Image (tube, rainbow, N blue to C red):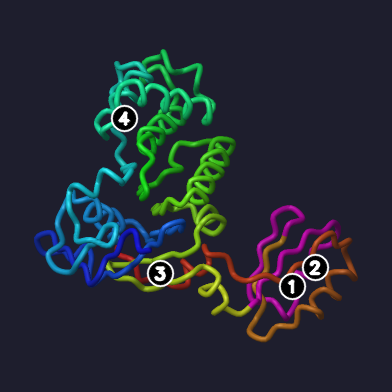
């Protein structure tokens, strides 16, 4: 079942077209990545989904019905610009957020306490927000987003401010929510997280969709011409005539072969002067696909 659909949506601010004829659909139990360079129209698209702004043309549906404020009761939204009350205690703040979404005080208190334990911030519930690190505040904001068990979770840069440990914790939590049937849309610059987490993506540039579909299908369009080599010894093989581009990170090499480059020949050359611990032929990363698609075409 489509949880959110945009059909031919366009939004203009004064003389700038922020979003042009954008269409996308997100299903229940799906993780969806909305990608693009700065100024591409990601945040404008999200704001229209949330009813913060209205499209000039096109159609937006939530839960298979035309957009209505009532539908937002089933939506959790984490904006890029965070909105916590600095002087308020964490638990009081989370209860307040829960009540805004229709939860009774006792229910909001229990859910807030359970979520705080789940995200390892139970010891901070009695502290004021201003006493906590940016990463801790980010987790509080996330709890406020999901406290009412929304069926659609929309997040703008959800990993901002999180250290690697807490980023992994958030990744695991999002996967659990997806397994429970929630549709999850997030916009981020972190291509590695999109590649790991998302079932489908839409890459927009200058307000238009330039690449969209299921992650597996998109990556299959590109030639498997990248090689990861982990080695010890001579790096002379990186000068091979089979290589179009190579980066060497102290024994970890990332290589792009020339068109129809011979990976077996490269392996033979590498093994002649170095001990090879890993030699893997891989698809291009989502980051490289992003750069190939958008590079040189983004607005300054």
Looking at the image, residue 72 sits to the left or right of residue 32; the answer is left
Query: Alpha-carbon distance for marks 3 and 4?
Result: 40 Å
Q: Classify mark 4: residues with Cα within 10 Å, few (<14), some (14-19) or many (20+).
A: many
Q: Which residue does the image show at 42% across and 43% down from the upper left? A: 158
In this rendering, does residue 300 appear at all? no
Identify the mark at residue 236; answer none if there is no mark.
2
Query: Alpha-carbon distance for marks 3 and 1?
Result: 29 Å
Residues marked 3 and 4 touching at CB (< 8 Å): no
Q: Is residue 264 above or below residue 270?
A: below
Secondary structure beneath dot 1 equals helix
State the residue position of label 3.
294
Q: Earlier in the sequence, mark 3 or mark 2?
A: 2
Looking at the image, residue 121 sits to the left or right of residue 296; the answer is right
Looking at the image, residue 216 sits to the left or right of residue 159; the answer is right
Question: Looking at this view, is 279 or 115 the one in front?
Answer: 115
Identify the mark at residue 98; answer none if there is no mark.
4
Q: Which residue does the image show at 36% across and 73% down from the upper left? A: 210
Where is residue 298 shown, x and y percent of the image? Answer: 34, 66
Q: Which residues are magenta?
A: 224-252
Q: Which residue does the image show at 38% across and 63% down from the upper left? A: 1
Image quadrant holding the C terminus, namely bottom left
Secondary structure beneath dot 2 equals helix
Q: Nearer the viewer, mark 2 or mark 4?
A: 4
The image quarter in which residue 239 lies: bottom right
Q: Nearer the viewer, mark 3 or mark 4?
A: 4
Where is residue 87 shown, x and y percent of the image? Answer: 29, 16
Q: Earlier in the sequence, mark 3 or mark 4?
A: 4
The image quarter in which residue 229 lies: bottom right
Identify the mark at residue 239; answer none if there is no mark.
1
In this rendering, does residue 109 appear at all? yes
């Amino acid at each position: 079942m489509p949880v959110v659909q945009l059909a031919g949506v366009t939004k203009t601010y004064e003389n700038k077209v922020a979003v042009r004829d954008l269409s996308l659909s997100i299903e229940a139990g799906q993780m969806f990545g909305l990608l693009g360079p700065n100024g591409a129209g990601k945040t404008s698209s999200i704001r229209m989904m949330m009813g913060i702004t209205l499209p000039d043309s096109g159609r937006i549906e939530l839960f298979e019905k035309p957009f209505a404020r009532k539908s937002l009761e089933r939506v959790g939204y984490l904006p890029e610009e965070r909105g916590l009350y600095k002087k308020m205690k964490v638990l009081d703040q989370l209860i307040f957020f829960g009540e805004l979404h229709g939860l009774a005080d006792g229910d909001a208190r229990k859910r807030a306490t359970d979520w705080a334990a789940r995200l390892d911030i139970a010891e901070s519930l009695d502290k004021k927000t201003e006493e906590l690190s940016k990463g801790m505040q980010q987790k509080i904001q996330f709890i406020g987003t999901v406290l009412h068990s929304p069926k659609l979770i929309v997040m703008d840069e959800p990993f901002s401010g999180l250290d690697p440990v807490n980023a992994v914790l958030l990744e695991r939590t999002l996967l659990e929510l997806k397994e429970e049937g929630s549709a999850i849309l997030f916009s981020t610059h972190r291509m590695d997280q999109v590649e790991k987490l998302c079932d489908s993506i839409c890459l927009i540039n200058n307000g238009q969709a330039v690449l969209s579909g299921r992650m597996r299908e998109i990556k299959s369009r590109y030639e498997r011409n990248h090689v990861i080599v982990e080695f010890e010894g001579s790096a002379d093989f990186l000068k091979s005539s089979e290589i179009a581009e190579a980066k060497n990170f102290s024994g970890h090499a990332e290589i792009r072969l020339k068109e129809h480059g011979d990976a077996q020949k490269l392996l033979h050359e590498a093994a002649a002067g170095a001990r090879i611990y890993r030699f893997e032929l891989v698809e291009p990363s989502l980051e490289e696909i992003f750069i190939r698609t958008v590079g040189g075409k983004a607005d300054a």
